[in-house]
Amino acid sequence: MQTQNPFLDEMAKLTQAAMGLAQAAGEEAKSAFRSQTDKWAADLDLVRREEYDALKAEVAALRAEIAALKAAKGA
């Protein structure tokens, strides 16, 4: 939208530039936060859900195998 007033044109350009900077700063803050939380998770040596589920399934299979061996030994 073009106006005849150069002051209003300049204010519109400045406002648009400020909004662009604010958006870029928000994205940068989000990226920094994600990076920091990833670092904290790595420092805490947390396990991912997929690894936990795989280990849980392996333990269940081993328990079943132990139960079968105990049953065969007792028979």
Image (spheres, rainbow, N blue to C red):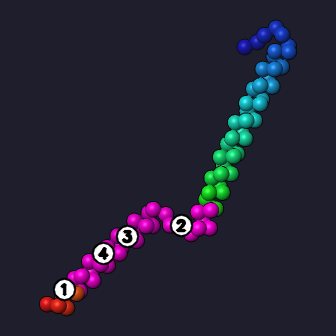
Query: As displayed, is residue 70 above or below residue 4?
Result: below
Q: Quadrant of the N terminus?
A: top right
- Name the amino acid, label 2: Leu
Disc 3 packing (10 Å; few <14; some 14–19; many ≥20): few
Q: Are marks 4 and 1 in contact (CB under 8 Å)?
A: no
- Name the amino acid, label 3: Lys
- Name the amino acid, label 4: Ala
Badge 2 marks a residue whose secondary structure is loop
Query: As displayed, is residue 24 above or below residue 10?
Result: below
Badge 4 marks a residue whose secondary structure is helix
Q: Tell me how far mark 1 sits from mark 2, CA to CA.
A: 37 Å
Asked if residue 10 lies left or right of residue 40, the reply is right
- Name the amino acid, label 1: Ala
Q: Tell me how far mark 1 sits from mark 3, CA to CA.
A: 23 Å
- Counting from the top left corner in percent of width and height, residue 7 is at 85, 15
Q: Which residue is mark 2?
A: 46
Q: Which residue is mark 4?
A: 61
- Identify the mark nearer the N-term, 1 or 2: 2
Q: Which residue is mark 1?
A: 71
Name the residue located 78 percent from the left edge and 10 percent from the top edge: 3
- Identify the mark nearer the N-term, 2 or 4: 2
Q: Tell me how far mark 2 sits from mark 4, CA to CA.
A: 24 Å
Q: Which residue is mark 3?
A: 56
Q: Residue furthest top?
A: 4
Query: As displayed, is residue 5 above or below residue 25?
Result: above
Q: Are marks 3 and 2 in contact (CB under 8 Å)?
A: no
Examine the image and state in which quarter residue 14 appears.
Answer: top right
Q: Tell me how far mark 4 sits from mark 1, CA to CA.
A: 15 Å
Q: Tell me how far mark 3 sits from mark 2, CA to CA.
A: 16 Å
Residue 14 is one of the magenta-drawn residues: no
Q: Magenta stretch: give its range.
A: 40-69
Asked if residue 45 lies left or right of residue 3, the reply is left
